[in-house]
Image (spheres, rainbow, N blue to C red):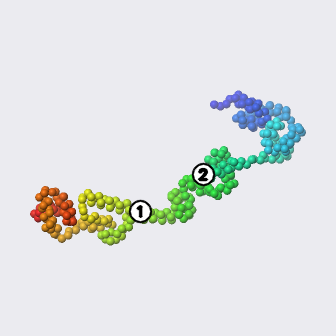
């Protein structure tokens, strides 16, 4: 809701009554009213005040003494002593040619020590956060830290990269990493070191072997080798085979060679020795299944037989 003209006049009257020595600019700022309206409303009274307080020699001497004796006084303090506004005092002093010294600012050593301590405590803190905590601007915080020489202890480029979890230099060779190579800054390795590390990781994940079939060296992932050996072991337990399991080969061809797939050792009847024949006949009298007969022959005679082979022998009348 917009302020009415009446409410603005009331605010101006109140501020002027409480601070009769203030100028029009300060009254307008305090009452939150435009300067033109302030001058229009308080025009008569501001004029009367200037007429009531004429610029006499005694008042000029009073102003000169105040400025000479206590240079730390501000224009507001002099205004309270003399009754003139700060704006008019500036004009008077400038017209008289008096050089008013700037009030010295006391150096707050406690504040400086606190800012430096906060920076040492957490170098990744931003200037704005430190300034917000101590109650000053980030630019003033930067000036204080630079006075202490901390811009060399905590370089801005390095701090910004650490704050975002990035690396500006390679962790191995300490070469500067360009800002455009975001992936390398994230890992902390330059191009050359990244390639070397990739090859090293690749070799560390592999195992070097020699194929038992072709006697050629080959390599494979350690995880793949582990699961191949584990599957072989589980298969041997499941089929209850006592023969020695074949090692890991370099290819399917070499694996088939080691397992003797499609290889016939002589004729079929060469495997049927008298001992095996007598053993199978005794097992058949006990009405044992062909699968159990195969397991029994493999266990007792270390001979590989299949269900199809024994079935064929029975059909041919050899058993």
Task: In the rendered structure, find residue 122 and report the number of the disc placed on it.
Answer: 2
Label 2 crowd bin: few (<14), some (14–19), many (20+), radius 10 Å: few
Say which residue appears at 45% left-offset and 65% top-offset.
200
Task: In the rendered structure, find residue 6 and report the number of the disc placed on it.
Answer: none
Say which residue appears at 22% left-offset and 68% top-offset.
263
Q: Position of residue 105 (x, y in %)?
A: 75, 47
Q: Is residue 246 left or right of residue 29?
A: left
Mark 2 vs 1: CB contact within 8 A: no
The mark tally for this picture is 2
Taking the view exactly as shown, the residue that stands out farthest to the right is 57
Task: Tell me the residue that label 1 is attached to.
Answer: 205
Q: Is residue 245 above or below residue 8?
A: below
Which one is nearer the viewer's eye here, 65 or 5?
65
Task: Tell me the quarter of the picture where residue 296 sits.
Answer: bottom left
Mark 2 or 1: in front is 2
Taking the view exactly as shown, the residue that stands out farthest to the top is 6
Which SS class for mark 1? loop
Q: Position of residue 61 (x, y in %)?
A: 88, 41
Label 1 crowd bin: few (<14), some (14–19), many (20+), radius 10 Å: few
Residue 141 visible in the displayed image = no
Task: Tell me the quarter of the picture where residue 38 sits.
Answer: top right
């Amino acid at each position: 809701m917009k302020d009415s003209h009446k409410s603005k006049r009331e605010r101006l009257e109140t501020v002027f009554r409480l601070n009769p020595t203030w100028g029009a600019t300060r009254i307008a700022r305090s009452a939150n009213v435009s300067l033109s309206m302030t001058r229009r409303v308080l025009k008569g009274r501001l004029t009367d005040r200037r007429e009531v307080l004429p610029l006499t020699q005694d008042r000029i001497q009073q102003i000169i003494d105040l400025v000479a004796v206590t240079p730390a006084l501000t224009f507001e303090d002099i205004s309270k002593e003399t009754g003139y506004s700060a704006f008019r005092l500036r004009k008077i002093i400038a017209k008289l040619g008096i050089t008013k010294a700037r009030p010295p600012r006391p150096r707050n050593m406690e504040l400086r020590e606190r800012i430096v301590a906060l920076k040492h405590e957490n170098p990744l803190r931003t200037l704005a956060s430190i300034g917000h905590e101590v109650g000053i601007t980030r630019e003033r915080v930067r000036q204080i830290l630079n006075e202490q020489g901390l811009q060399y202890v905590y370089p801005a480029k390095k701090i910004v990269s650490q704050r975002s979890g990035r690396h500006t230099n390679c962790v191995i060779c300490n070469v500067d990493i360009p800002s455009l190579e975001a992936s390398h800054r994230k890992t902390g390795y330059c191009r050359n070191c990244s390639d070397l590390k990739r090859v090293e990781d690749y070799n560390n994940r592999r195992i070097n072997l020699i194929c038992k079939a072709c006697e050629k060296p080959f390599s494979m992932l350690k995880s793949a080798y582990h699961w191949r050996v584990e599957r072989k072991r589980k298969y041997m337990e499941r089929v209850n085979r006592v023969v020695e399991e074949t090692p890991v080969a370099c290819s399917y061809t070499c694996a088939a060679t080691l397992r003797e797939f499609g290889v016939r050792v002589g004729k079929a009847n060469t495997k049927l020795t008298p001992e095996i024949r007598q053993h199978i006949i005794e097992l058949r009298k006990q009405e044992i299944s062909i699968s159990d007969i195969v397991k029994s022959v493999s266990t007792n005679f270390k001979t590989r037989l299949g269900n199809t082979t024994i079935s064929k022998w029975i059909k041919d009348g050899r058993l």
